[in-house]
Image (cartoon, grey):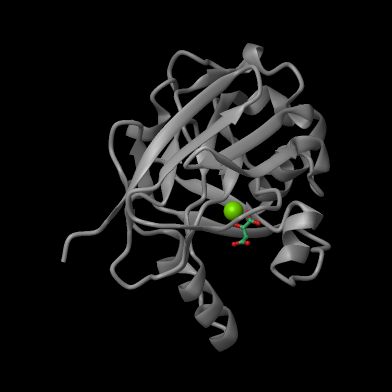
Amino acid sequence: MANTRNVSRFWEWGRKIICVGRNYADHAKELKNAIPTEPVLFLKPPSAYVREGSPILVPLYSSNLHHEVELGVVIGKGGTAIPQADAMEHVAGYALCLDMTARDVQDECKSKGLPWTLAKAFNTSCPVSDFIPKESIPDPGNVKLWLKVNDQLRQSGCTSQMIFSIPYLISYISDFITLEEGDLILTGTPKGVSAVQEHDELQAGIEDVVTMSFRVDRQEQ
Ligand SMILES: O=C([O-])CC(=O)C(=O)O
Ligand SMILES: [Mg+2]
């Protein structure tokens, strides 16, 4: 069994954040991306974490910062080439996460064939909830996620819509990138992504499990 106690403050561990993109067909379509035939991966550094009480900062170089609500999977036991059948033994728990994305920068990177680093990995690009012990989400393949901006519902989806399941993702990622205790996997966002502005209030939740809220500020010059 994974040791859930150790990683309950996983954001302080300095471990990697592995993000899966285009894992919901409805979101891939809204951004006019093809439905992937294998997982699309990118990384955020641990400096991207932000916790409730601190604001999400719009980077100086972006004028189109988007929210993406996602289920995060916290790794409790590391491994390489983890078989799908064993994958859930490596999970300590979950977190509600936002994959904040400078969409204008990402669009430019995409058109130039450049990596998404400044679009996805800037400071405060990964707001996270408290740690959610594994037992609190018995079926991570069927949880409802939602996000509101200033009390207006923008995203509402269910992890049952994921193209690649959590066990598949853990197995796939660990073939190439060794997973370590305290790593976080962001499993992709459902449709409804949209822009946020300075002074907006974001509220997000996993139905019946957790809610969190963040204020948006502009980064100081
Ligand atoms: O930027 C994107 O659209 C890819 C992504 O992170 C997601 O689908 O969650
Ligand atoms: Mg995302």
Q: Residue furthest left?
A: 221
Residue 78 figure quarter? top right
Is residue 77 visible in the rendered image? The answer is: no
Residue closest to the eye, 63 or 140: 63
Horizontal side of residue 116 vs 49, given as left or right: right
Residue at the spot 73% in from the left edge and 37% down from the top edge: 166
Check the image and report above or below for 86 versus 100: above
Horizontal side of residue 18 vs 54, given as left or right: right
Check the image and report above or below for 143 versus 123: above
Residue at the spot 37% in from the left edge and 49% down from the top edge: 48
Residue 73 point in image, percent of width and height = 60, 33
Residue 215 figure quarter? top left
Q: How many marks?
A: 0
Check the image and report above or below for 10 versus 147: above
Is residue 202 visible in the rendered image? The answer is: yes
Horizontal side of residue 3 vs 161, given as left or right: left
Residue 42 point in image, percent of width and height = 56, 59
Horizontal side of residue 181 vs 34, given as left or right: left
Residue 191 point in image, percent of width and height = 70, 52
Residue 20 point in image, percent of width and height = 64, 52
Residue at the spot 43% in from the left edge and 20% down from the top edge: 8
Check the image and report above or below for 82 versus 92: below
Residue 1 figure quarter? top right
Q: Quadrant of the C terminus?
A: bottom left
